[in-house]
Image (cartoon, rainbow, N blue to C red):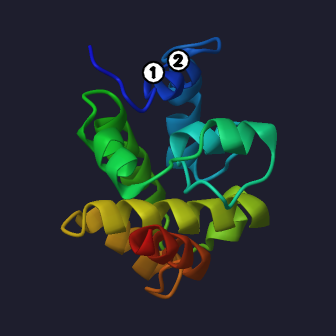
Amino acid sequence: MNDPYDLKRFVSAQDSGAGEGGTFGQALAELQLGNKAGHWMWFIFPQLAGLGQSPTSRKYAITSLAEARAYLDHEVLGPRLLECALAFSNHAGRTAEEILGGIDARKLHSSMTLFLRAAPGETVFKTVLAQFFDGQPDEATDALLAEQDQD
């Protein structure tokens, strides 16, 4: 299969780990409970390149809207992202910080903004932004996308 964006890096990370469903299964269970405990944010809710500075953040960064669209169109990754975003959205009344912690709440904000820009009609991304971020997109993500648009 043609994989110009090396999306298999996400599938490999999500499928690794012990237990039913690997790390993806763990992440989904934590999201359903509303209590993140594991270390999976980078490859479950990826964000745009240029936002995170750690080696792991850079490894799993999405480089463009085209890559974000390819992620959404991927037969494994797209449905998993939507399932995780939906599970997260079921915790209206709590804050993203309560569920994820402050740093990962910011990562979620940027991820939801990126994927909303890649798929404007996908309502779950709008829902997460509305419920947890006052309907506001992540400004840093939008600024980086605007810079890419000018290139």
Can you say whether 104 is above or below 45 in the image?
below
Q: Residue 132 carries which label?
A: none
Q: Do the residues labelled 1 and 2 touch (CB within 8 Å)?
A: yes
Instruction: Residue under label 2, please give it.
Output: 12
Left or right of 32 on screen, residue 39: right
Point 53% across, 40% down: residue: 44
Q: Nearer the viewer, residue 116 or 127?
A: 116
Instruction: Residue under label 1, please give it.
Output: 8
Q: Residue furthest right?
A: 54
Point 57% across, 37% down: residue: 43
Can you say whether 117 is above or below 23 in the image?
below
Can you say whether 103 is above or below 27 in the image?
below
Can you say whether 12 is above or below 35 in the image?
above
Left or right of 66 on screen, residue 14: right
- Circle 2: residue type: Ser
Q: Nearer the viewer, residue 123 or 59?
A: 59
Q: What is the crowding at mark 1: few (fewer than 14 residues within 10 Å), some, or many (at least 20)?
A: some
Foreground: disc 1 or disc 2 = 1
Q: Which residue lies furthest to the front in this view?
A: 151
Task: Estimate the x, y position of residue 13 in percent, counting from the top left.
Answer: 58, 23
Quadrant of the snapshot with the N terminus: top left
**Does residue 37 appear anywhere in the picture?**
no
Left or right of 20 on screen, residue 76: left
Task: Estimate the x, y position of residue 123 in percent, counting from the top left.
Answer: 24, 67
- Circle 1: residue type: Lys
Q: Real-space Cα distance between discs 1 and 2?
A: 6 Å
Left or right of 2 on screen, residue 94: right
Quadrant housing residue 135: bottom left
